Image (cartoon, grey):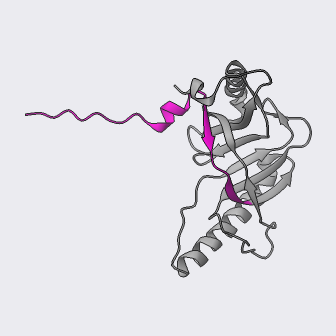
Amino acid sequence: MTIAIEKPRTRTRALTEPRIIEMPSERMAVVETVGDPNLVGKDAIPALYGAVYGLKFMEKRAGRDFKVRPLRARWMNWEAGRPTGAPHGIWGLPVPPLTRAMPQKPGNLSVGLQTWVYGTVAEILHLGPYAAEAPTIARLLSFIHEQGYEVQGPHEEEYLGQPDARLPRTLIRYRVKRAAGDERTINDHKR
């Protein structure tokens, strides 16, 4: 007798379609930068990971542990995926919710803490180079409008792999709110 085992759908494939979901707020270790992300990121990302791994090892010694999750960045002055001036970024990594201070490494950028508020968000997975995100962002923004929502926060990206990967995977996300006069509920938009 042969038993057929069906492989589950990959999360990646499902995320290439735009969706609207609810996300809880998260405590984030953050580094703020202004300038070309390819240049300022070379200092911001190591400082951020150094502090978060320092926190992880401190927590582990205290009998607690947490998984270091993918890097995120909020681009504060971007419209439709492009900066409206020098890119102003807040790079972040999730940390345990009760974190009150981040270990600092001498010579690195200062790593702070913020709570990133989410709630209702729209997101889509972009597969490919960062420079080729514009059509994916346009598709997500169109979906947001078609579903009766409007953007209510900064452009956010979550980097699901290494930047030098053969096929970079970037989750593009916006906080959204119901557009004035639209009475639909979030359940009307679930697929």
Does 172 appear in magenta?
no
Image quarter of the N terminus = top left
What residue do we see at 74% from left, 33% from top? 177
- Residue 31: image x %, image y %? 78, 59
Q: Residue furthest top?
A: 146
- 94 with respect to 175 (left or right): left
Q: Residue at x 84, y 54 (%)?
A: 33
Region in magenta: 1-29
Farthest residue to the bottom: give it.
61
Note whether residue 176 is visible: yes
Q: Residue at x 76, y 59 (%)?
A: 114
**Along the line of sight, the residue nearer the viewer: 52 or 161:** 52
Left or right: 153 as drawn, with respect to 60: right
**Residue 29 position (above or below residue 182):** below
Name the quadrant containing residue 55.
bottom right
> In the figure, 69 relative to 109: above or below?
above
Viewer-proximal residue among 97 and 184: 184
The x, y position of residue 116, in whole percent, is 73, 52
Q: Outermost residue toward the left?
A: 1
Q: Quadrant of residue 138?
A: top right
> Is 115 situated left or right of 21 in this image?
right
Which sits in the foreground, 34 or 148? 148
Q: Residue at x 81, y 66 (%)?
A: 109
Q: Is residue 94 left or right of residue 110?
A: left
Residue 19 among those drawn in magenta = yes
